[in-house]
Amino acid sequence: DAGVTQSPTHLIKTRGQQVTLRCSPISGHKSVSWYQQVLGQGPQFIFQYYEKEERGRGNFPDRFSARQFPNYSSELNVNALLLGDSALYLCASSTGTGAEAFFGQGTRLTVV
Amino acid sequence: AQSVTQPDIHITVSEGASLELRCNYSYGATPYLFWYVQSPGQGLQLLLKYFSGDTLVQGIKGFEAEFKRSQSSFNLRKPSVHWSDAAEYFCAVVGDFGNEKLTFGTGTRLTIIP
């Protein structure tokens, strides 16, 4: 079975641009969460979606948004990119509350 | 608010030696605790988790962790490390079971020397 898949694996953007990151959860998983991991730090929670509804939001500006589709895949959008948005963005899926979260390999975003 | 502290940024251990990685958490009630491992350029893999019950939990790859409420700790141990254990290790907590937000520590980088 395929694990959590994220695309693209790497991308480079210019300050001020917008970016969309994609995540496909494990089959049967209805919960998707997004994390930002800046180099040298632990992952920071951005969003959680369950059954297409937002369940939680971390301390990130409104430039960050996300959504979950009927097939439970998810997109993370970041507008007006800043240099500080350069990070590894991780997606995790689970069957729901209390279940183990499985992480994808991440998308490495570099803002220049 | 929940928080996690990993006091050791970097640990170096000889292959075959024992290992203990420290983790302290802050949360008012009984937390749900996790240890994840991350190899370079990879995502996170769950090593073990504590929800309730026996305070000594066994995980994959020969790792174990002990929950000590009195010390607010959840230290990770392995009796004999292998070169393949070199990686970044993260302790994490979920405070509210209805909210799956994982709060991570800053991580401990483990280096193995021959």
Image (cartoon, coloured by chain):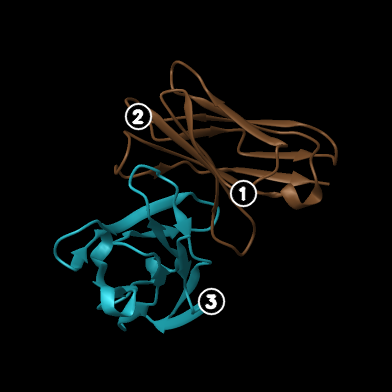
Chain colours: A brown, B cyan
Disc 1, SS: loop
Q: Position of residue A55 (x, y in %)?
A: 46, 35
User: Residues at marks 1 and 2, common chain?
Assistant: yes
Residue A41: which disc?
none
User: Residues at marks 2 and 3, common chain?
Assistant: no
- Residue at 53% from the left image edge and 76% from the top image edge: B9
Q: Amino acid at mark 2?
A: His
Q: Amino acid at mark 1?
A: Asn
- Count neighbours of disc 3 (C-alpha within 10 A) and say few if under 14, some if 14 to 19, many if 20 or more: some
Question: Who is closer to the viewer here, B15 or B64?
Answer: B64
Residue A71 located left or right of residue A17:
left
Q: Disc 2: which chain?
A: A
Quarter of image, res B71: bottom left
Give the residue number, with chain letter if any, for mark 2: A29
How many numbered discs?
3
Q: Which quarter of the figure is the N terminus of chain A placed in?
A: top left
Q: Determine if residue B88 is in view.
A: no
Structural distance between the alpha carbons of marks 2 and 3? 34 Å
Disc 2, SS: loop
Give the residue number, with chain letter if any, for mark 1: A59
Mark 1 or mark 2: which is in front?
1
Q: Amino acid at mark 3?
A: Ile
Quarter of image, res B95: bottom left
Q: Position of residue A94 (x, y in %)?
A: 35, 37
Structural distance between the alpha carbons of marks 1 and 2? 25 Å
Disc 3, SS: loop
